[in-house]
Image (spheres, rainbow, N blue to C red):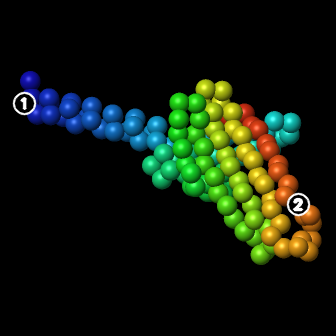
Amino acid sequence: MNKHLPVLIALLGFGLVGCSKNESNVLNLLCKDDGNASEWNVVINKISNSITFYDRIYEDNFSIDSTSISAERVKTYAGNTTYYESITYYPQSKRLARSTTEVPIVENHPRLRSPETYSTSSTCQIN
């Protein structure tokens, strides 16, 4: 028996464990909205503490507990609207919930007279 074989097996085992751990730190999902045909790629990255949905990155208040993974973001556009957005993934049921509240920050907003909230839910599968 080659004297280097135990070392090689140990390194191989360590590499496999390391790869498995890294794969579980990044979760790639394909989510389909309930009630319509829209599909979205969602990436949950436990290393960077972020959730990427569409072209948006949610990093604020990133949290993982026994039932969900969630994050938020706040953005102001066109100097007249602030968007408060949250996204939550429920691994047990493979469900994704998104919520956006638009808040007008000027009195003469072209579209909004008061805050409006939109919510969407999706069913996801691991990509």
Residue 6 in the figure: left or right of residue 60: left
Q: Quadrant of the C terminus?
A: top right
Task: Using the rendered image of the protein, determine whether residue 69 is visible from the camera's viewpoint.
Answer: yes
Disc 2 element = loop
How far separated are the C-alphas under marks 2 and 1?
74 Å
The part of the image, by quadrant, that contains residue 35 is top right
Q: Which residue is mark 2?
A: 114
Q: Residues within 10 Å of mark 1 (few under 14, many from 20)?
A: few
User: What residue sits 58% from the left and 30% below the top?
Assistant: 67
Please, is residue 75 above or below residue 5 in the view?
below
Residue closest to the far top: 1
Residue 92: x percent and y percent? 61, 26
Going from N to C along the chain, the mark reached first, 2 or 1, is 1
Residue 92 appears left or right of 121: left
Do labels 2 and 1 touch, CB within 8 Å? no
**Looking at this view, is 1 or 39 the one in front?**
39
* Residue at 79%, 42% in the rendered image: 120
Residue 65, image x, y percentages? 53, 35
Q: Secondary structure at mark 1?
A: loop
Identify the image quadrant of residue 108: bottom right
Q: Quadrant of the N terminus?
A: top left
Q: Residue at x 82, y 51 (%)?
A: 117
Q: Which residue is mark 1?
A: 3
Regarding residue 125, the answer to whether it shows in the image is no
**Mark 2 residue type:** Ser
Q: Nearer the viewer, residue 8 or 116?
A: 116
Residue shown at 86% from the left, 40% from the top? 36
Q: Residues within 10 Å of mark 2 (few under 14, many from 20)?
A: few
The amino acid type of the residue labelled 1 equals Lys
Residue 79 vertical placement versus 93 (above, below): below
Residue 88 percent location from the top left of the image: 65, 41
- Disc assigned to residue 60: none
